[in-house]
Amino acid sequence: MRRDVIHSLLVANRGEIACRIFRTCRDLGITTVAVYSDADADALHVREADLAVRLPGSAPADTYLRGDLVVAAALAAGADAVHPGYGFLSENAAFAAAVQDAGLTWVGPPVKAIELMASKTRAKELMAGAGVPLLAPVDPATAGPDDLPLLLKAASGGGGRGMRIVRELASLPGELLAAAAEAASAFGDGEVFAEPYVERGRHVEVQVMADAYDTVWALGTRDCSLQRRHQKVIEEAPAPGLEEALRTRLHDAAVAAARAVGYRGAGTVEFLVSAEGRPYFLEMNTRLQVEHPVTEAVFGVDLVALQLRVAEGEPLPAPVPPPASGHAVEARLYAEDPARDWQPQTGALLTLEVPDGPGLRLDTGYVGGDTIGVHYDPMLAKVIAHAPTRTEAVRLLAGALERARIHGPVTNRALLVRSLRHPDFAAARLDTGFYGRHLADLTTPGAGDPATAALAAALAEAVRVTGTPGPALTRFGAWRNVPSQPQAKRYRSEPDGAEHEVAYRTPRTGTPEPYDAPGVRVLAATPDRVTLELGGVTRHFKLRRDRDRLYVDTAGASYTFTALPRFTDPATQTDPGSLLAPMPGTVVRLAEGLAPGVAVEAGQPLIWLEAMKMEHRILAPASGTLTALHAAPGHQVEVGALLAVVQEDPDVTPVTASAPVPEENA
């Protein structure tokens, strides 16, 4: 068989997956080539690559989804191979063919295999012939009450786009139209199919690796049941609590699926496992998965290195995979606010420090000082823990996330820690409805001590402003000859909005101390570190300031405070009923007939914004009359921009109907 030795590799992707592939290339002595949009000109994957080629523009459709530009970039940089990563063009058969037509090595499966698995409906037909267990399809035109609930899915693409759960027959026609419209917009294919929705099902998948010499490895199972918007949040390997017979059946079905399409390289066969333990084929992802690190940890392999080996025409190193060892868990760290409908967040990422140590791994496309933009997925990093047992791996991961220092936009870090420590997760009671049942509890303010953290912030600020004598900080004018009068500081904690007022004074020693706080003693205070004794227990607080924001990290908790002025500025007040943009984005559409003077009702979707691959609905805050409308389709808006104003009047009867509401998906 032909051998194509790879010397220079272009990664047709961005962010953490590009950085992760580059890491393996460096280990193998392969030159790395990045492509980047204008929005990513200073991104980490660009800085880490040996060479980089600009793709003019910022939107994915103009850059990372332009296969012709990516192939031209590979040729211009002298690359001899292309790795697609995941997402973007990774499962695009035409792109794979174009890479090969240009004389480049494609680090992925055969074009035919991608084509066969590209449509979920065609893939299911193929899998049925291979004996892979399937859910029986349902014809929406003849669906009856006994068929409910139904799951509508786009035939092409993934990431939850075009997916709907239908529990009432009356809503089926509208949901079909909305799902088809969203699928057509996202993938250029409006085909939608229906199948039974399995309540409390588990998402279990099998990693496969195949070469051109008839060797197919089944590299164990992964459980990816903890999902939001049909996207995975926490994944682990092996999938816990499966009977050995079920594991064997899943492995055999995955191998059969790979052989049925003549597969080569890395792929994942995804299954839905019912509460009764029955598996059903969902789809085959003909690429590397986001969650591949947990399989790498358990089997001690480098899946990217194996992909490159197979692409070069080499066989897998053995007829059977290496033995599995231990348990691995991965958490996806997102810049998003789970308590506010998972809204993505943007802005400067001031600090991203995750503890390093045995069993821990960090895959990221960001470092402190980078900026999180509006154009791409809000995932910052993946944190992976590997240990001899599941209990140890979960504990290690939760502890690492808890000790991480992450300053800047709101993230889902606290949600991840609470999820990992939730009794249902600890007992491996897993299903895709986990967040539907537990999100409210997981996002309520915890039992931390924000008041003491605010005190530490005030003391650090006092030191920064006035100075402290001694080796910790020396500034002219630090000494005071008389004790100061009590000073007050006000802070608003984020994202919950709670306010905290702290009183302190600066005595002759120069070190500020809390005022009227019995049982609290200041042991040390500098602008970036405060040590307090509370009830005989010493606690350390690390601090960072960015303009009017202060970030406080202490054992078991992290806090973000905004310093408030002593008096409220009337100019900062917003008129009642104002609808403000919760994030920067693009207005994609308005409710039908929306215009000043029309009546709206509380909770009615009025405006749709698109940001970071997600669509967000702006709802009427109250029933009344729309008195102002500043948004129009195509408008780019910044966070806090005034979109519309609703004058409340509960007696007003709405006369407009909103457009079909698509589910918000990445």
Image (cartoon, rainbow, N blue to C red):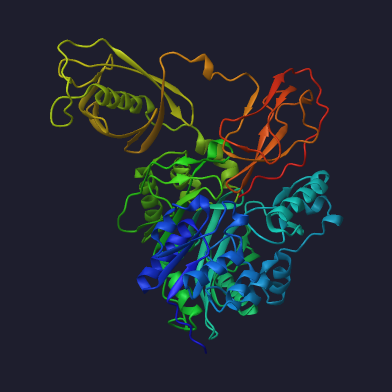
The residue at 63%/48% (across/down) is 665
The residue at 30%/27% (across/down) is 456
Q: Quadrant of residue 545?
A: top left
Q: Is residue 610 visible?
A: yes
- In the picture shown, does residue 634 fall above or below 273? above
- In the picture shown, does residue 434 fall above or below 209? above
Report whether 384 appears left or right of 97. left
Report whether 516 appears left or right of 346. left
Between 464 and 398, the residue placed more toward the observer is: 464
The residue at the far left in this view is 470
Q: Is residue 246 visible?
A: no
Location of residue 517 in the rendering, given as x and y in whole percent from the top left corner: 28, 17
Location of residue 493 in the rendering, given as x and y in whole percent from the top left corner: 43, 28
- In the picture shown, does residue 386 fall above or below 263? above
Report whether 544 appears left or right of 508. right
Location of residue 215 in the rendering, given as x and y in whole percent from the top left corner: 52, 82
